Image (cartoon, helix red, strand yellow):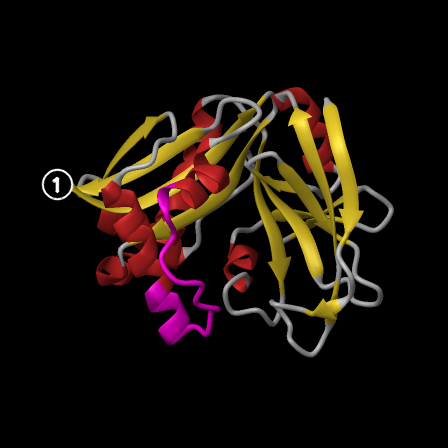
């Protein structure tokens, strides 16, 4: 790994829990292998592009790193309905990340919907350069998961395949297809892919109880939660 610099943001209102004060520690890297990132992931870090980050909030510890133990995961009734509704109707194509007008349009429509209906901050359309910095430029190969209904792109996810796990980075979808629960279908597809490859874990990032956009991660059980002492505890 070649670290460029590390910094911690000044305390500010939390974007997940506005009544809390948040701070993030960032590390910018010039080089990073999948093996090196896996060590950081297991210690509670996440990344976008060449930037790794983790919460270092002054008082709140509500951000929980969660992962799904693939061998013991059992989909619940709603998740089984999601699989039944989408298997055979939605096609997944996995390839290297790239920027296209179709993805930029889908990303912008998803974020506009989330801003209007969930309260996300609306930063306006994402241009090709910003999109590439977030989702295309990586220190090691990353997979782009494109979901199609017929020939129509309805969802895009980014997944790190690491030596002992898959890590779901980000997912967005067509708001007109929201009844299909494509976000759930993406997580379930990631778990199935890990199982087929013999990988023991799928990392989902941070679960924040009380944050509508992140609480969904608590529905994948059993799951393991990173504790303050650096060990992973099973939660059923």
Residue at image point 75% right, 60% down: 23
Residue 123 magenta-highlighted: yes
Residue to which mark 1 is pinned: 150
Quarter occupied by residue 94: top left
Whether residue 162 sits left or right of residue 102 in the image: it is: right
Whether residue 44 sits left or right of residue 216 in the image: it is: right
Residue at image point 66% right, 22% down: 31
> Quick one: label 1, few (<14), some, or many (20+) residues within 10 Å?
few
Number of disc labels: 1
Q: Is residue 181 visible?
A: no
**Of residues 183 and 219, the one drawn nearer to the viewer in this rendering:** 183
Which residues make up the magenta segment? 112-128
Residue 160 image point, x, y percent: 52, 31
Residue at the limit of the structure toward the left, as seen here: 150
Vertical comparison of 109 with 189: above or below: below
Residue 81 image point, x, y percent: 30, 54
Q: Is residue 130 visible?
A: yes
Residue 107 image point, x, y percent: 34, 52
Vertical comparison of 195 with 80: above or below: above
Quarter occupied by residue 116: bottom left
Residue at the limit of the structure toward the bottom, as seen here: 19
Vertical comparison of 43 with 111: above or below: above
């Amino acid at each position: 790994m070649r670290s460029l610099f590390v910094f911690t943001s000044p305390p500010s209102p939390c974007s997940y829990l506005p009544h809390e004060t948040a701070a993030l520690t960032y590390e910018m890297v010039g080089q990073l292998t999948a093996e090196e990132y896996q060590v950081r992931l297991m210690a509670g870090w996440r990344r976008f592009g060449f930037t790794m980050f983790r919460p270092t909030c002054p008082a709140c510890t509500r951000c929980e790193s969660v992962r799904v133990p693939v061998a013991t995961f059992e989909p619940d009734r709603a998740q089984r309905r999601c699989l039944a509704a989408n298997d055979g109707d939605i096609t997944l194509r996995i390839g290297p990340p790239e920027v296209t007008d179709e993805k930029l349009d889908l990303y912008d429509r998803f974020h506009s919907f989330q801003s209007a209906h969930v309260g996300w901050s609306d930063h306006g359309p994402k241009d090709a350069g910003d999109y590439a910095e977030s989702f295309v430029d990586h220190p090691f190969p990353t997979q782009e998961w494109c979901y199609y209904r017929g020939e129509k792109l309805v969802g895009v996810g980014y997944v790190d395949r690491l030596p002992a796990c898959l890590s779901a980075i980000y997912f967005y979808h067509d708001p007109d297809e929201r009844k299909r629960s494509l976000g759930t279908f993406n997580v379930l597809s990631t778990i199935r892919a890990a199982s087929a490859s013999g990988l023991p874990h799928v990392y989902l990032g941070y679960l924040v109880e009380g944050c509508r956009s992140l609480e969904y991660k608590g529905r994948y059980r059993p799951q393991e939660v990173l504790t303050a002492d650096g060990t992973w505890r099973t939660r059923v």
